[in-house]
Image (spheres, coloured by chain):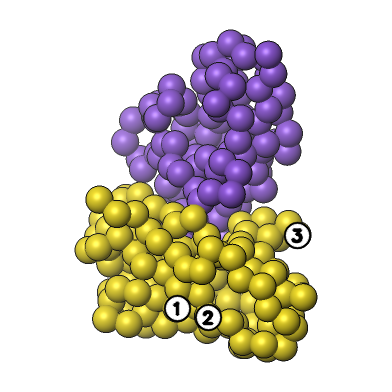
Chain colours: A yellow, B purple
Amino acid sequence: GAGVSQSPSNKVTEKGKDVELRCDPISGHTALYWYRQSLGQGLEFLIYFQGNSAPDKSGLPSDRFSAERTGGSVSTLTIQRTQQEDSAVYLCASRGRGSTDTQYFGPGTRLTVL
Amino acid sequence: AQSVTQLGSHVSVSEGALVLLRCNYSSSVPPYLFWYVQYPNQGLQLLLKYTSAATLVKGINGFEAEFKKSETSFHLTKPSAHMSDAAEYFCAVSTGGGNKLTFGTGTQLKVEL
């Protein structure tokens, strides 16, 4: 079946602009995660959605970052007033219902802030 | 809190030689442990995972890892390296609470002829 998809694959923006990154999880997966991969920080957790529960936002680096998940499926990560340090690859993952189920990752969105 | 340490940011082996990538974890509760592989410009692909069943875990592409609680280790091995194994490998730990993954800094594996 289809895997996790993300769009766009690449995004170049100017400092100060807002960006939206999209994630389509595997159909039926109840859990969705956003991670960030950057040269300076490695791979780090950003935010986690599980069903209709309140999201775990503990990894968001600042209040410029927000995410939503509509209808328990598609998720959008929004970065407001982008800064150069936001340049990174943003990875989305989804997981089935079981706690031991695998997190499947999408190909990522490479964000470059000029 | 949980953390992962991967010793060696770069490992080079000859084709056909043993691959050993080291991972040590820190966790106050029983962990789940994972190895992911990342090929250039691609997302992460799961190689194998330990979720408190058998301590020796076999994964895809001939890789395996052994959970050793006494050593807090989860090293990844493969008996014979292929050129196609060249990639970056990440060890990760989760301890419930949504199973958020905490990753190590990664090991770049180079396979030489």
Residue A50 occupies quadrant = bottom left
Residue visible at 40% across and 76% down?
A75
User: Which residue is denoted by mark 1 in the rendering?
Assistant: A76
SS for callout 3:
loop
Above or below: residue B40 compared with residue B73:
below
Q: Quadrant where the C terminus of chain A lies?
A: bottom right
Q: Amino acid at mark 2?
A: Glu
Gap between marks 1 and 3 measured at Cα: 24 Å
Q: Amino acid at mark 1?
A: Thr
Residue A16 in percent (x, y) is at: 72, 88
Few, some or many residues within 10 Å of mark 1 (<14, 14–19, 20+): many
Residue B50 in percent (x, y) is at: 40, 39
> Do the residues marked 3 and 2 share a common chain?
yes
Tell me: A10 left or right of A55: right
User: Which residue is denoted by mark 2 in the rendering?
Assistant: A20
Tag of residue A111: none
User: Which residue is denoted by mark 3 in the rendering?
Assistant: A40
Q: Which residue is the extreme one toward the top?
A: B16
> Do the residues marked 1 and 3 share a common chain?
yes
Gap between marks 1 and 2 measured at Cα: 6 Å
Gap between marks 3 and 2 measured at Cα: 22 Å
Residue A103 in percent (x, y) is at: 39, 54
Few, some or many residues within 10 Å of mark 2 (<14, 14–19, 20+): some
Q: How many marks?
A: 3
Q: Nearer the viewer, mark 1 or mark 3?
A: 1
Residue visible at 73% across and 38% down?
B9
Q: Chain of mark 2?
A: A
Residue visible at 52% across and 20% down?
B78
Few, some or many residues within 10 Å of mark 3 (<14, 14–19, 20+): few
